[in-house]
Amino acid sequence: MLKNKSFWKIFIPFTSLLCFSLTITGYFASTIIKGYHAGQLAGNPASDIKSLVVSIIFAFVVTGIIGFIVIKVNTSPLLNITQTAKNFARGNFTGKVEVACSGEMRDLADAINTMGVELQARTQIILDDKNKLDAIMANMSEAVITTDYQERIILINNAAQAMFGISKVEINKDYLWEKLRNEKVCSLVRELILSSGKTGNGSRSAKVVEVEILSPEKKLLQMHLSPIQIDKITYGILLVFHDITELRKLENARREFVANVSHELRTPIATIKGYVETLLENEVTSEETLREFMGIIMKHTQRLDNLIEDILQLSKLDSSDLKMELHELELYGCIENIFSHYKEHCVKKDQTIELDMPPSLPAMETNEYLLRQLLTNLLDNAIKYTPNGGRIGLKVETVNGSIRFEISDTGIGIAQEHIPRIFERFYRVDPSRSREMGGTGLGLSIVKHIVNLHHGVVKVDSNIGSGSKFIITIPRQQPRYTGTTNTL
């Protein structure tokens, strides 16, 4: 305390004032006492007492005024510091403490100013971190929900609100079971809260489960649940949801594809094996029988070769790193060549094939090999499924900057319930009829992939007994493809 300059600044003036007040009071008191002894009070003692009281009051008034000035001068920096500290507490860091004095008050003012600068910097860091977290949470594709230990929602991102159809959430007020109408999710959260405990080791309580939601749309989700712990105390539960609906569909499609390939390969191989074993175990002397067996083996060998070729082609088209080489193609000559080839095929089945194409057809940016394969697969199907004496049509025209291909026939047609699935791999409207005609079940799937690679659209118009019409629209100019390998 002896080194405290502020203490001495207040103590010394007050001591001086006290001494001054006592001195004035003592002076007047001694004067009155002396007059009393000298017999002067006998004349007017009341007046002398009044003078004494007035003198004392005057001395204390002067002391009070001077003391007020001294206190105000010495405490005004402290009031300034207090006000600035209150502003800092409210989050207002613009002001600073300005004091003209030196000593402890100056040191305190400098400390308050330094604290304000540091608080402002740390507050800005916290605010920046919060903004970054909010931006990350808002742009995450995974749904994230955080609850406290009482199952109140303390954080939810946009993906979670969209996934579960939640329009509005009051943070720290709404409960999870109020907004998330899924009993399995809510029960898992409660189980995790009970198993982790407020002071238990929650790291072992984390779970990964699959749940299905039906609203707002049916989805399969992979849910990660883990406790939020600080110093081994559980404060809440973190839920992260991954939409695995499409992934599961792809896995199922892959399993079905493998099963279908195995089945499709097994049939011709078993047939070939059976006829070869017959030839080896039995002496076939009839040349006619031998030719018949060899024809059957050749037919199934060709079918096997076609199947493998289509599988490889489809795998290549389905590759994510496929690069399609594009160039300007004069369509008139290319279509004429394809039409001439199939005209000969139709003659053998007494079918009529017609071409409707203007001579002024503009060039198109495409891959000629893929375009030929697209038209070949569709024309092959049209000829296969059109009886003798039927008609096949190929129409090519320009429509709003795109090329429109229309392949029509008067064949057996496709029932409406089958149309949505005819582009699936190995899907057949009539499996026995398709295999009999040598189909692999992959032709239309290849067509769909080629159209997608060209950023086009394919439509089907068909009915049982009235034939089919495949309409394909492809832009004349293609966007640049970013793939780097598997060139076509």
Image (cartoon, grey):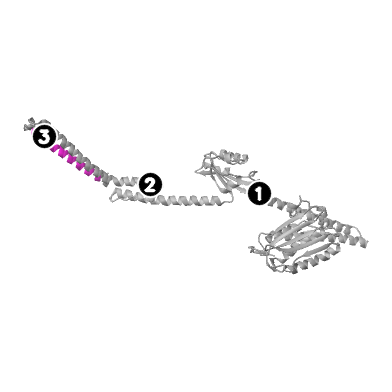
Among the 4 quarters of the image, the one containing residue 333? bottom right
Examine the residues drawn in magenta and state their main secondary structure: helix
User: Magenta includes 343?
Assistant: no
**Residue 342 in sight:** yes
Q: Secondary structure at mark 2?
A: helix
Kind of residue indicated by mark 3: Ile
Q: Which residues are magenta?
A: 8-35
Kind of residue indicated by mark 1: Thr
Q: Nearer the viewer, residue 394 or 443?
A: 394
Q: CA distance from mark 3 to mark 2?
A: 57 Å
Name the residue located 28 percent from the left edge and 49 percent from the top edge. Answer: 103
Q: Which residue is mark 1?
A: 245
Q: Secondary structure at mark 1?
A: helix
Among the 4 quarters of the image, the one containing residue 360? bottom right
Q: CA distance from mark 3 to mark 1?
A: 108 Å
Q: Which residue is mark 3?
A: 32
